[in-house]
Image (cartoon, helix red, strand yellow):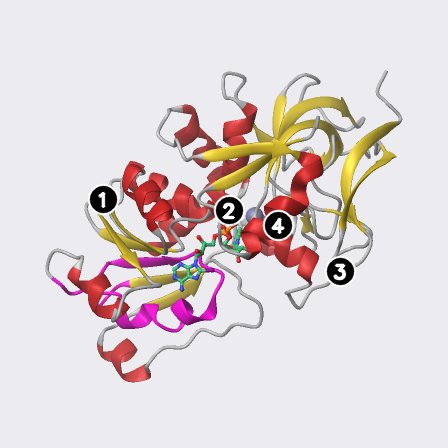
Amino acid sequence: NLPEKQWAMVIEKTGGPVDYKEIPVPKPGPDEVLVNIKYSGVCHTDLHAVNGDWPIPTKLPLVGGHEGAGVVVARGDLVTEVEIGDHAGIKWLNGSCLSCSFCMQGDEPLCPKALLSGYTVDGTFQQYAIGKAAHVARIPKEVPLDGVAPVLCAGITVFKGLKESGARPGETVAIVGAGGGLGSLACQYAKAMGLQVIAIDAGDEKKKMCMELGASAFCDFSSSENLVKDVQAATEDGTGPHAVLLVAVNEKPFQQAAEYVRPRGTVVAIGLPAGAFLKAPVFETVIGMKTIKGSYVGNRKDTTEALDFFKRGLINSPFKTIGMSELQKVYDMMQQGKIAGRYVVDTSK
Ligand code: 8ID
Ligand code: ZN
């Protein structure tokens, strides 16, 4: 009794446009589940996919989206651990081989055969989406599906990035791009993990939001005359934050963070601006024993843990809901850096 057709947002070619149209409801393979997506967050990655910003091409035509929360409505013959009616999330990592050396050590995002939702396989800007049963996020029933959607990429990713930073409770982390989707969740995860937050972004709306989310200082990159000094001055002893989480979509901060991170500190690159390079002065990096590293989404355990923070009420990042058919409007605002927090699309509209 599943419908034959459904509404989806589809791009036919890189660059868009993204069209609201009816397409067939896909059928799950033996190891897959079909999820009736209720809400999906809109990540800047979805916009990178439309724009063709990255060296890996997307499938085409493409249904984007990878923060989809909904209800399992069908499953393949081999699936035993997920029940019809369970709440589930389809995240960026749609599937992986589970047997390569990366999968074996819980690094499934590094699997050479990884399937990526809304990129190499169709994602969650549709009413019915497919995920590998082993990889769908298990969402507790008491959790609201709209509020939890952004956790499925943004939440997992920043939670993992904070772990990778090595910052410990009481220490300070600078979040660069703190007013955006990943950044707003990073403020909350960092606070919940006992870290102090220096938020870096632009404008009064984002400043207000970041302070409400628990940041202890805000540095405005658009008006600061010396951002490096401002960030360091915002730390107790003036030597800079213990860690920096880069979630901006701009090359400049990727070339600046190593200057203001504290000696022994760690810079974690997460944002993926097109064609960008990391840069750091060798002298200061060496004599300051600084670490620069990348962090990429999270594994199944990180997913469960990030969802558990949400379930416990520790994550209350703001989101706005809009009909899925209005996705282009969200992309336009995102391109201009005008979104404070996250937009979530309602797939029924
Ligand atoms: O696993 C990963 N590594 C991963 C997972 C998910 C997303 C990486 N990402 C990448 C996305 O592909 C994107 O490149 O993280 C980046 C951020 O995604 P987002 O949070 O969804 O983007 P957003 O909501 O547009 O927020 C970006 C924020 O950066 C600020 C903007 O003002 C905006 O609030 N920003 C910019 I652009 N330049 C800045 C600067 N110089 C800046 N903030 C501080 N300094
Ligand atoms: Zn994402």
Which quarter of the picture shows residue 209?
Answer: top left
- Name the residue type under label 2: Gly
Identify the secondary structure beneath mark 2.
Answer: loop
Q: Nearer the viewer, mark 1 or mark 3?
A: 3
Which of pointers 4 and 2 lies earlier in the amino acid sequence? 2
Tag 3 residue = 14
- Kindly identify which residue carries mark 1: 169
> Callout 1: 10 Å neighbours few (<14), some, many (20+)?
few
Q: Report the side of 237 relative to 313 (left or right).
A: left
Q: CA distance from mark 4 to mark 2?
A: 25 Å
Q: Secondary structure at mark 4?
A: helix
Marks 4 and 3 close (CB-CB < 8 Å): no
Q: Is mark 3 within 8 Å of ligand 1?
A: no
What kind of residue is marked 4?
Answer: Tyr
Quadrant occupied by the N terminus: top right
The stretch in magenta equals 238-265
Of label 3 and label 2, which has the lower sequence position?
Answer: 3
Residue named by callout 2 = 298
Disc 1 marks a residue whose amino acid type is Pro
